[in-house]
Amino acid sequence: MKIAIINGPNLNLVGVREPEIYGSISFDEYIPQLRLQYPNHDIHYFQSNHEGAILDELQEIGFDYGAIILNAGGLTHTSIVLGDCVKGITTPVIEVHISNIQEREDYRKHSYVTEPSVHFIHGQGLDGYRLGIDWALENIPMDNV
């Protein structure tokens, strides 16, 4: 299966930024480990601090991939257009957050991405991405790829 992991603003700082919340392993360290766990699947990784670049990436791959694991970062809580984009593509989107957004600041409790997504994982640290891939492999029909 072709699986994309798309991360939004500030997630390039994971491993450095607030390690008590986000952990001390960077995505540069984590993604190669994840690819080793799934050698029979094509895992594409994209991160941007720019909303338009994330929208462009979703629209570019959102009709050809088996699944998208999306952590939109702070855009989760602010971007109606991001939610609309997820609604507009055919690739199933699994929303992932490293921290438990329901136990953080009030403004983080609302997500424009949850409703159009097929699954939601939060509060599992970086392991949430692996859980998202596992969920996709178990629940998304292979004829979707």
Image (tube, grey):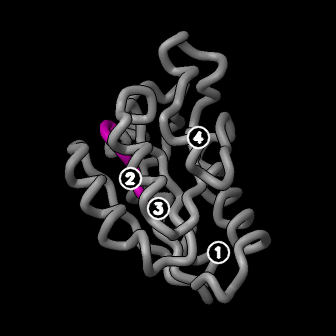
CA separation in Å, label 2 and label 1: 30 Å
Reading the chain from its start, which is encountered first: label 1 or label 4?
A: 1
SS assignment for the magenta stretch, majority: loop
Q: Name the secondary structure under disc 2.
A: helix
Q: Quadrant of the C terminus?
A: bottom right
Residue 104, given in percent of the width and then of the height, sits at 58, 16
- Judge depth for marks 4 and 3 and give the one in front: 4
Q: Which residue is mark 1?
A: 37
Q: Which residue is mark 3?
A: 5
- Magenta stretch holds residue 117: no
Residue 34, given in percent of the width and then of the height, sits at 57, 68
Q: Residue furthest top?
A: 106
Residue 85: mark in rendering: 2
Reading the chain from its start, which is encountered first: label 3 or label 1?
A: 3
Instruction: Name the residue at 44% across, 81% down.
Output: 64
In the image, which residues are magenta? 6-10
Looking at numbered disc 1 in the image, what kind of residue is underneath it?
Gln
Q: Which residue is mark 4?
A: 114
Q: Name the secondary structure under disc 3.
A: strand
Looking at numbered disc 4 in the image, what kind of residue is underneath it?
Thr
CA separation in Å, label 2 and label 4: 12 Å
Residue 124, given in percent of the width and then of the height, sits at 68, 41
Q: Say if 97 sits above or below 101 in the image.
A: below
Please tell me in which quadrant of the rendered image residue 88 appears.
bottom left
